[in-house]
Image (cartoon, grey):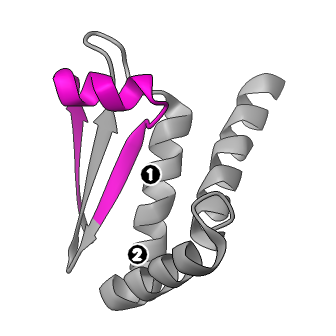
């Protein structure tokens, strides 16, 4: 699957960043577009990259339709914070934090 990553630090990106939204993975057939909301001159956090790239892993695992079926079903049933795919991505962030704290 092709992955395109872009940093968005325009007014919209700053607005999203201030609301604690750090990124989004847009899963399309055969391609994932990852947008990182950030402030000008501020690099994207490693944990944010890992979170969004975990969604790319999920899209590769389940395929385009399978990913969206799972994601939207979980969103409907459990909301964003208890969505199984989001929890898996948050676990990936935690692994990075742990690895960085012990090294």
> What residue sits 65% from the left and 51% below the top?
90
Residue 15 lies in the magenta stretch: yes
Of residue 78 and residue 9, the one placed in the foreground of this image is 78
Q: Residue furthest right?
A: 102
Residue 5 lies in the magenta stretch: yes
**Location of the N terminus (image quadrant):** bottom left
> What residue sits 42% from the left and 81% below the top?
67
The magenta stretch is 3-26
> Label 1 belongs to which residue?
52
Residue 67's place in the image compared with 13, above or below, is below
Residue 66's place in the image compared with 44, above or below, is below
User: Residue 52: percent from the left, percent from the top?
Assistant: 44, 51
Q: Which residue lies furthest to the left in this view?
A: 10
User: Residue 70: percent from the left, percent from the top?
Assistant: 50, 84
In the shown orientation, is residue 26 left or right of residue 20?
Answer: left
In the shown orientation, is residue 88 left or right of residue 27?
Answer: right
In the shown orientation, is residue 43 left or right of residue 87?
Answer: left
**For marks 2 and 1 on the same chain, the one whose residue lies earlier in the sequence:** 1
**Location of the C terminus (image quadrant):** top right
> Label 2 belongs to which residue?
59
Alpha carbon separation for disc pair 2 and 1:
11 Å
Of residue 76 and residue 95, the one placed in the foreground of this image is 76
């Amino acid at each position: 699957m092709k992955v395109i990553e872009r940093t968005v630090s325009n007014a919209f990106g700053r607005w999203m960043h201030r609301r604690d939204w750090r990124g989004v993975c847009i899963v399309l057939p055969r391609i994932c577009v990852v947008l990182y909301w950030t402030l000008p001159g501020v690099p994207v956090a490693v944990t944010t990259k890992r979170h969004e790239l975990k969604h790319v892993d999920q899209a590769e695992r389940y395929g385009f339709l399978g990913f969206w079926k799972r994601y939207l079903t979980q969103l409907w049933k459990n909301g964003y914070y208890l969505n199984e795919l989001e929890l898996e991505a948050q676990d990936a962030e935690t692994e990075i934090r742990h690895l960085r704290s012990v090294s």
